[in-house]
Amino acid sequence: MHRSDLPAPRRPRFPITGLPASIRAVLRPEAAVPHPAEVPQRALRVASYNVHKCIGTDGRFDPDRIREVIREIDADIIALQEVDRRFGTRDGLLNLPELEARTGLVPVPVSGIRNADGWHGNLLLVRSGLVQNVEQIALPGLEPRGAIVTDLQFDDHGPLRVIAAHFGLLRQSRARQVARLSSYLQATADMPALLMGDLNEWRSDHGSVLHGLHAQISTLPPAVASFPASRPRLPLDRIIPFGPGVLSPVSAHDSDLAKVASDHLPIKAWLAFQD
């Protein structure tokens, strides 16, 4: 268990510009993204982004581009994947002090390989709130994969559980990984929860392994294409809510910089808390 005091909670900022008018939904026709004036006051901007080890679609390694895209998103909570080198010492790539200075986002503490920023490449960044508990989970499958389960407490919003994960490339592995995480979602009846990350699942029908979450959620929310970044066709990245709380339609952050900084586009949404 880890415990860490993050900066004092603040009411999220709601920019009056920058929200796309629609999303490229693949499970249903395009849905309108709420105008910022319609976003409930008790809401957080949440996001997920596979940074592809800071290698862009042009083949360049450039962490500064990734940090700038994260700043553009202006999330209160963001799950990142592939933040470390894949082999060797697994060095972290993002320069977290520089990222915090630029965005105000603080990493949830994890332990593992000495030089790594995350856990199996997963990193969760939070702008405000109290980290009450962190659990690092090794996910089953052919490839080494992991997830971070974090329980957060916000003065303005109450409790929230966030599971940041990166699922495997093989369908059989993904099915086992869904089953491994199901118990953590069952334990959230008294608070909202989010599963966020690159889940590597593009199917929308009942062939999707994400339907293995049916015991915790009645229907999967519409997905948005996020891969490849230059011309998105597949909804590999997901934000899935559980329990209390309402998630706005998920949208891809498709700025000019995001289209080149990584091979995935970030995805984002508003999570509204119920009174």
Image (cartoon, rainbow, N blue to C red):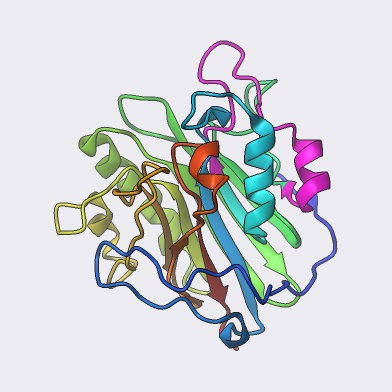
Left or right for 202, reference 76: left
Q: Position of residue 139 (x, y in %)?
A: 40, 36
Looking at the picture, does residue 41 appear above or below residue 189?
Answer: below
Of residue 16 and residue 75, the one placed in the foreground of this image is 16
**Residue 1 visible, this angle:** no
Of residue 224 and residue 113, the one placed in the foreground of this image is 224
Q: Position of residue 232 (x, y in %)?
A: 35, 48
Q: Residue furthest front?
A: 256
Q: Position of residue 262 (x, y in %)?
A: 50, 37
Q: Residue furthest top?
A: 88
**Residue 74 on the magenta segment:** no
Looking at the picture, does residue 99 appear above or below residue 190?
Answer: above
**Residue 181 visible, this angle:** yes
Looking at the picture, does residue 20 appear above or below residue 237?
Answer: below
Quarter occupied by the N terminus? top right
Of residue 182 and residue 274, the one placed in the foreground of this image is 274
What segment is highlighted magenta in the picture?
80-106
Looking at the picture, does residue 115 appear above or below residue 267?
Answer: above
Left or right for 225, reference 206: right
Quarter occupied by the C terminus? bottom right
Q: Quadrant of residue 116?
A: top right
Q: Going 32% across and 72% down the picture, which residue do you hit?
A: 30
Of residue 143 and residue 136, the one placed in the foreground of this image is 143
Q: Going 68% across and 75% down the picture, which residue do you hit?
A: 14
Q: Going 28% across and 65% down the picture, which residue do you hit?
A: 215
**Residue 85 on the magenta segment:** yes
Count of numbered marks: 0
